[in-house]
Image (cartoon, rainbow, N blue to C red):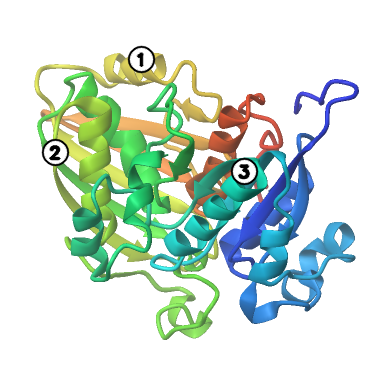
Amino acid sequence: MSTPMAAGTSRIPTLILGGSGYVAGEVLRLVLGHPGLELAAIMSESHAGQPVAGIFPHLRGMAGHLAFASRDEALERLSPGRMLLLSAAPHGASAALIAGFIGKAGERGTQLTAVDMSADFRFARATDYEAVYRQPHGAPELLDQFASALPEHLAATDRPHIGHPGCFATGMLLAAVPLLKLGIAEDDLFAVGITGSTGAGRTPTPTTHHPERQSNVFAYQPLVHRHGPEVIGLCEQASGRRPRLHFVPQSGPFARGIHLVMQARLKGAGSADTLRQQLQDFYAGAEFVTVVDGMPRLKDIVGSNHCHIGLGVNAGSVAVVVVEDNLVKGAAGGALQWANRKLGLPESMGLDAPGMAWA
């Protein structure tokens, strides 16, 4: 269970930006149920003044009284003292938006911690970001204030803000970093990941339309997906080795979740039992990562912040299988892990709900 706040301890006011997408809905759900946080505002310029329950009717019981705030209204909620900013704004828009809040926080005496779920602060250099996203970075002057890593791979950072890795990146990093850091595998990593339709966002497209996704699986952007450079850079940062990543993403006929298989050649001999024990030891202190016997299944983790990992070994190769919820562990939940840690709260606070099993 979540650790309750000590008597007399105030909850930390929290702002959510980019508030009408699927990730924002998950962030809102988690924040409203978090014993250490208190919602100060959820911002959506396109829905300012409209009821939150009109966009997220499943949250009506918790959010029926709430309305979306405009940017100016959200800025006015900044106050002296500790505050949290969670941005679910789109790639390319989030950085400039966050910069405005960080600047205003300085004027107001707000001790602001920002966690961004877009790609805008996942690269160390603006040129690296611009090479992948084909647009200027919105706030290059803030890059050295943001650290980017999975919380399982970076024990601590003195940088005040966090750029949380993406959903596919989360699955690949959980598999790749121990393979590289422990010297288990060679540098060529081959990954195939299947994602649910919520990974494509709220706006319908031909590839997310239900008749196209139902009973269907298809690859897209094979070997050129934008998470590839992100994963390579974060692998190097976490392991000291720069892999050659060969990634094929696929669209699956389900709404949420990622099932990812990463394969590599082993550097030496090793049985499945030996390698499984190495991964279990590597993630021994990780509250949300479980290395299981056998193969993990999506239904065991959907709706939760938990990730299950399994593996198989044969003929000098290893296959690591990762399942995660793309909206929780791959976005909102992983971001809240970082928020908890940066705010000095227990890392599992507000995130210990189990999977939904038969969703």
Alpha carbon distance from label 3 to label 2: 30 Å
Q: Position of residue 224 (x, y in %)?
A: 18, 63
In primary-sequence order, the first of circles 3 and 2 is: 2
Marks 1 and 2: in contact by CB < 8 Å? no
| Residue that appears at 38% across and 32% down | 310
| Distance between mark 3 and mark 1 Cα atoms | 24 Å
The answer for how far apart the CA atoms under marks 2 and 1 are is 23 Å
Question: Which residue is drawn at the image coordinates 46% and 73% (left, top)?
Answer: 215
Q: Which mark is residue 69?
A: none
Q: Nearer the viewer, residue 84 or 72?
A: 72
The residue identified by callout 3 is 304
Spot occupied by residue 145 in the image (x, y as percentages of width and height): 40, 40
Q: Secondary structure at mark 2?
A: loop
Q: Is 43 located above or below residue 128 in the figure? A: below
- Amino acid under disc 3: Ser
Amino acid type shown at disc 1: Gln
Which label number is shown at residue 277? 1
Of the 4 image quadrants, the one containing the N terminus is top right
Q: Residues within 10 Å of mark 1 (few under 14, many from 20)?
A: some
In the rendered structure, the answer to whether residue 20 lies left or right of residue 161 reads right
Farthest-out residue, front: 107
**In the shown orientation, is residue 284 left or right of residue 76?**
left
Residue 178 in the image: state x and y as whole percent: 28, 25
Give the residue at mark 2: 243
> Mark 1 falls on what kind of element?
helix
| Residue type (three-letter) at the residue carrying disc 2 | Pro
Q: Going 24% across and 36% down the picture, which residue do you hit?
A: 235
Q: Earlier in the sequence, mark 3 or mark 1?
A: 1
